[in-house]
Amino acid sequence: PRLVDPPPGTVFLDGRDVRQWPLATLRGAIGFVPQEPFLFSATLAENVGFGLGVDPEARARVERAAWVSCLDADLASFPKGYDTVVGERGITLSGGQKQRTAIARAVAVDPTILVLDDSLSAVDTDTEETILSRLTDVMRARTCLIVSHRVSTVRGADQIVVLDDGRVVEQGT
């Protein structure tokens, strides 16, 4: 997303240096989920649907994205389901629920590029496995970059790059 500009000629999108893409266009194509996601003091549906605008299919997209991220499993515990206000920065949610809300948000906007930056670190391994299974179809249709400390998170990747102190030490499948 060019939060930091890479050196010229090092990062390309569709054969074009990312520095040549208009920033709004580039960022509009990316669904980015950081390890510590930012949530708004709004409803769960508004947090997941952020970026959908006035899409008439917004609610269906929110519900499908919540299913993909396994957030739907927690809806019964929320006082008003999708209409539950999550509080400032998602204070009423656990770390895993925050991450799953952010994953759902990224999936809902149907980005060309999906970046998951250690975004499953706060979920248990069973939930992680279910989310990764549900993400299979989502990831098949786009470029995905997954950052993780868990091998289980990246085991299905086409290419795995192991970094140590910012340097590539292993690469393969």
Image (tube, helix red, strand yellow):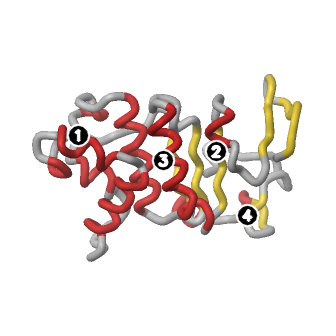
> CB of mark 2 within 8 Å of CB of mark 3?
no
Quote the CA–CA distance across marks 3 and 4.
Answer: 27 Å
Q: Does residue 56 appear left or right of residue 132 in this picture?
A: left
Q: Please report whichever mark, 2 or 1, sits nearer to the chain's N-terminal start.
A: 1
Residue that carries the numbered disc 4 in the rendered image: 13
Q: Outermost residue, front direction?
A: 126
Q: Does residue 44 appear left or right of residue 160 in this picture?
A: left
Quote the CA–CA distance across marks 4 and 2.
Answer: 17 Å
- The residue nearer to you, when weighing 137 against 47, is 137
Q: Please report whichever mark, 1 or 4, sits nearer to the chain's N-terminal start.
A: 4
Q: Which-is-in-front pick, marks 2 and 1?
A: 2
Q: Amino acid at mark 3?
A: Ile
User: Residue 143 at x, y = what percent?
Assistant: 66, 60
Residue drawn 65% across and 29% down?
Answer: 149
Q: Which-is-in-front pick, marks 3 and 4?
A: 3
Q: Amino acid at mark 4?
A: Leu
Residue that carries the numbered disc 3 in the rendered image: 131
Residue drawn 20% across and 47% down?
Answer: 43
Residue that carries the numbered disc 2 in the rendered image: 146
* Residue 2 shows up from this direction: yes
